[in-house]
Image: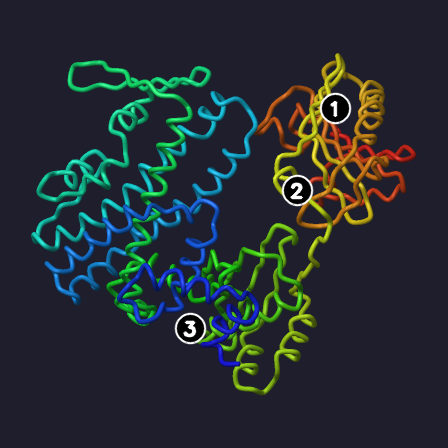
Amino acid sequence: MQTNDYIHWWKFEKENNLEDVEKTFKNHFSTARFLPPIYHPILYKYLKNSQIKHWNEDIFSFSKDKIQEIENKLGKKVMASTLLSNFHLLIYAYESILDLEERLIMMNRFKGSEELKAKIFSINIYNDLLNTAFSNTLKLFIEFYGVIEDKNLFQKNLTSQIEYLSSSKRGYQKITALADSNIRNAISHGGVKANGTNMEFFYRKGAQHLKHESTVYEFKDAILQLYDGITAIILSWIGYLCEENITYSQVYESESIHKDTSLFFERLSLSTFLTSCNSIFQIEIYNQKEKSEQVNVEFTGVDLDIDSRASLGLLTAEKIFHLRKLSVKDSIMITFKSSKIATSFFKIDCSVVNDLTKGHIDMGEAWRHVIDSKNVLMLPINDEDRNEFEDFFRYYPDIETDDYFVTEIEDVSLDDKKRFKCVVYLKRATRPSHVKKAVGEVIGRVKILENHGFSSHKVKHGKMEADIIYLVLYKNEVRRGKDRALYPNNNNFIAQIQYDINKVFPIRNRFIDPHLKRRREATIEYNWNPNF
């Protein structure tokens, strides 16, 4: 398979969503003869993502009309060059709505009071929508008018951007009205109060101090209206790119293109519908003999089995090798992240990629080279029935008595060992005997905690007692700084403790352990601060 068509093959054969994407968006992009594959991953999100799929069709049509208006004044050639030179503004808006999508989902799943939901989520989401995604879409439109009028029309803040575009001469009121000016002014100056289901927004107009009242439900509706409007504006620009068939060939190696635009298109060219390349960067590697380059690529998305990750990774390495014109002394690192797989990766030498490209070896032989190099970690899909949202937010309550405070309790279990680690503040311990008494009680209480496992990988979990517990002991409660250091000169640090039912004591810190005084008593190992 050639590296220039594997993405298309992957989407068509392994994901089977190409027909839906093409059928839906050819109707919206009426003059597009076909949908350039580079935009398929974005269009798929507009079809399937839980928030983006609700884009506002009226705003989409209005924005398309404005784009056509601008093109009529500039002509196609200047329009395309201006769009590509300012495309990073559209990227920033698009990436912002993807980030905010996760927060909207989290807000909807939050089961606290509406007042608390507003304080934790709504106000911040609305503010970030305004000052990131919305602002960047306005800046993009303004850049075109700067070219039309041959002026620098840059507007630094959101208010001036809105005022410029909402004038009767520009006619963007349908878009600028998405941002309620009273709410915007109140949020910008910290004048928002939530009380029960009611919200108050305090703002100024000239010398007047004014108040706008709303409910948390109306405010949430305003957030969604703004979000759906922004996504529609972004889609209208993607539609223009499709209709004019502006693809990676106009971006690749162009000196007039912003670096973020080039990277964005490169990531798109490596993305499928379900597996997105969300990061690619190149670093220099130095050793005693020579300098080389390493390209790191990160994928996120669905849970691919090991064979699929290996295949997609090797094909990606081939494409990167040619795209970035790497030499045989360089290397490529491919990383995969998804909800039911612990982070997986492999590194492949470009000498192997070169042999694969030239047909000297096949995919199986290339993968054997990767395995033999031992620069690989590919864990299987966790097939347990999990609730990912619960796994994200599960925690272990602190334990407090008159003698100690146990906090930062964390499940660090392995597939065959149930393990916890915690931080303990001993309130009244002044001698080793005091410490040992408290440690015995802490271990007794922690080891009977039920752990619940993880979505990403299988571990030993349940109501059985823990096999291993790792504790760090301090005198006084602190959460950062030098008083948390594990060195003897920190008078607040007492000891590291390890309980192991099998007396192996596997958790080690080669930087800290040599400075501490080790003592073992049955199933407990004490690594004392020698100055305690």
Q: Position of residue 122 (x, y in %)?
A: 42, 30
- Mark 3 secondary-structure assignment: helix
Q: Earlier in the sequence, mark 1 or mark 2?
A: 2
Q: Residues within 10 Å of mark 2 (few under 14, many from 20)?
A: few
Question: How far is disc 1 from disc 2 in space, using C-alphas?
Answer: 45 Å
Q: Position of residue 66 (x, y in %)?
A: 19, 52
Q: Quadrant of residue 28?
A: bottom left
Q: Residues within 10 Å of mark 3 (few under 14, many from 20)?
A: few
Image depth: mark 1 or mark 2 in front: 2
The kind of residue tagged 3 is Leu
User: Mark 2 highlights which residue?
Assistant: 387
Please state if 274 lies on the left or on the right of 67 as rendered.
Answer: right
Q: Are marks 1 and 2 in contact (CB under 8 Å)?
A: no
User: Mark 3 highlights which residue?
Assistant: 323
Image depth: mark 3 or mark 1 in front: 3
Residue nearest the observer in this picture, 179 or 365: 179
User: Mark 1 highlights which residue?
Assistant: 532
Residue nearest the observer in this picture, 429 or 213: 213
From the viewer's perspective, is residue 79 above or below residue 506? below
Residue nearest the observer in this picture, 410 or 267: 267
The kind of residue tagged 2 is Asn
Q: Position of residue 331 (x, y in %)?
A: 53, 69
Image depth: mark 2 or mark 3 in front: 2
Q: Are marks 2 and 3 in contact (CB under 8 Å)?
A: no
